[in-house]
Amino acid sequence: MAAAKSTAPRRSAGRGRLGMFLHLILRSLTARNGRLGIALAAITVGAAVVSSLTNLYFDISIKMSEELRAFGANVIISPHKTEQKKAGSDRGVDAARLTEALHALPKDKLLGGSPFLYGLVRLDLANAVLVGVDFPGLRTISPYWQVQGSWVSANFDERNAMVGRRLAESMELTVGKTVTITNADRTIRHPVTVRGIIDTGDAEDDQIFVNLSLAEKILNLPGKADFMMASVVLQANEADIVTARLGAEFPDLDIRPIRKISQADGQILEKIQGLMALVAGVILVITTLCVNATLTAMVAERTPQIGLQKAIGASNRDIVVQFLSETAVIAVVATALGLGFGFLLAQALGQAVFSAWVTFRPIVIPLTLFLSLAAALAASILPVRGAIRIAPARVLRGE
Amino acid sequence: MTAPNQDAPAPAEQSREVIGVSGLGKRFGSVAALQDVSFSVHQGEFVAVMGPSGSGKTTLLNILSLLDTPTEGSYRLDGIETAHLSEKEQVIIRREKIGLVFQQFHLIPYLNAVENLMLAQHYHSVADRDEAVEALARVGLAERATHLPSQLSGGEQQRVCIARALINAPALILADEPTGNLDADNEALVMGLLESLRDEGRTIVLVTHNPELGDRTGRVIRLQHGKRVA
């Protein structure tokens, strides 16, 4: 391009250039409230759903884990298999050692635990399995047990017992009745009152439960227990990590997650998180399509102005920057609104599903902003290409 | 508007060729909108391009304003051969050297009068409100600076357009039927403005089919069926 003498004014560079650009963006946006409102609403809805699901995503593993504790214990602490084969007075493991291991679990995540000591006893005229437990701990790890009557509340109570439903039926035991527990060699006879009748639908329905101290005396296994079961709030693969660490700390004990429960935790969590990601993705796609339609209509509406801007000196770059900036402004404002609505939505979902408040995670802000901007800018690609293709000569003569 | 504009070229430059068109042609498929059109316009000239509808006036103006490209011939604008310019270079030359005035005014509806001028400044270099208000004052609209186009009459809108065309002191002003949508009073006002610009030494090409307006310019280029006939 050959140089030619110009009579054009030489204004001082930098003075007001950004100001005029921002002014143009602001006037352009406020001049079309209707279409702007549609784009704003679309991105706000998208941002609200994404931010609420993201908030839930980060909270759900904790909430789910807490919910799944209703299914019972998820960690078992027992002697190694070789120790378990011992019989007579050598059987079992030091109950204090089991309690020590229980208390080594993360305190903020431990809901409770109970030792278990099993033995065969005679109840009046029939044989039954006696189980020594820590009743307060047992209650925390067995929240799904149906109890007629009430739980034995103290772990030093040796006068009360709880009896399984089928055992109670066969022996015609009811709440308040007394039954005498006799040990194998008939040297100990200990009367207990039935405080509650347990219905679990499992083996517990045939057993009688007393506090561990009483069971140790009746079974003549002082200070012993067979194993300990615990309920711990652990997310997904945390169970393996925590139990492995504890196993290293207590090499004499076998500490492991109960697979059935911990795997259910992980599988349900993965499915729910996958579903949430799918919903967020679908909402983002719908948002993108809605914004695309709105921006396309905006470009069509502004065709004469774009043509004029080009005719008076706007380059394609100027047009692209203006459109993308307008889209970015809409996206940022909509994201700010969406974050607010999203947090409220997350609270509503948290209350409805988990009956708990959802914690706000700061990571949600940049993540939602990024996804909203990406969706909005993706939506603007075709409309902006349309704007670039506008031929001012045709537009200005009204074609 | 009698005082000479300080942006206007000096008398010594008045013989400089601003437009040099040679063998210019434009075809739309099999239709020839322009054929073998040649002419020159020099600094300070006020030239009318006239002809009936479909004679190729608008096509010629689009080529002169670099909004369209010829399929044949050459076009030199202020010493620059435009035939092989990229789209980006065309934009730069258009914003630097050409001021456009349209029949239908074409103002940005959501910007007020002074902001419409500032937008042209913005694309040229940088917006300067004082200078834009001064330009509006030159067309008698200083007190209407903050009015939106919808609040201005047709004649006022066209004067804003003329002020916008002048704001970057272009080498060439191209006016396409600038009085086509105006009543007689406003037509006289706008033509008076263009004549005063000529008096300042501006180079103006006016497209019109109105013989009276053509007679008020210094020279008339007549087109018929895409060919120059006079």
Image (cartoon, coloured by chain):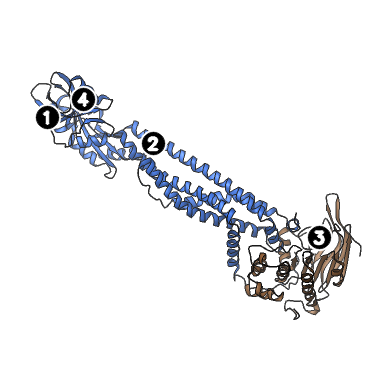
Chain colours: A blue, B brown
Residue type at numbered disc 3: Thr
Q: Which residue is mark 4?
A: A207
Q: Which residue is mark 3?
A: B58
For the residues bearing labels 2 and 4, Cβ distance under 8 angstroms: no
Q: Is residue B31 left or right of residue A169?
A: right
Whether marks 2 and 3 lie on the same chain: no
Three-letter amino acid code at the position of disc 4: Gln
Residue B26 location (% of width, % of height) = 84, 56
Mark seen at residue A277: none
| N-term mark: 2 or 4 | 4
Q: Looking at the picture, how far across and down is residue B70, in whole percent?
A: 81, 57
Residue position marked by numbered label 2 in the rendering? A266
In the depicted structure, whether residue A88 falls above or below residue A250: above
* The N terminus of chain B - image quarter: bottom right
Foreground label between 1 and 3: 3
Number of marks drawn = 4
User: Is residue B32 toward the left or the right of residue A122 in the image?
Assistant: right
Mark 2 or 4, closer to the camera: 4
Task: Determine if marks 2 and 1 fall on one subunit.
Answer: yes
Q: Chain of mark 4?
A: A
Q: Say which chain tag 1 marks.
A: A
Q: CA distance from mark 3 to mark 4?
A: 102 Å
Mark 1 = which residue? A217
Crowding at dot 1, Cα within 10 Å, few <14 / some 14-19 / many 20+, comes out as some
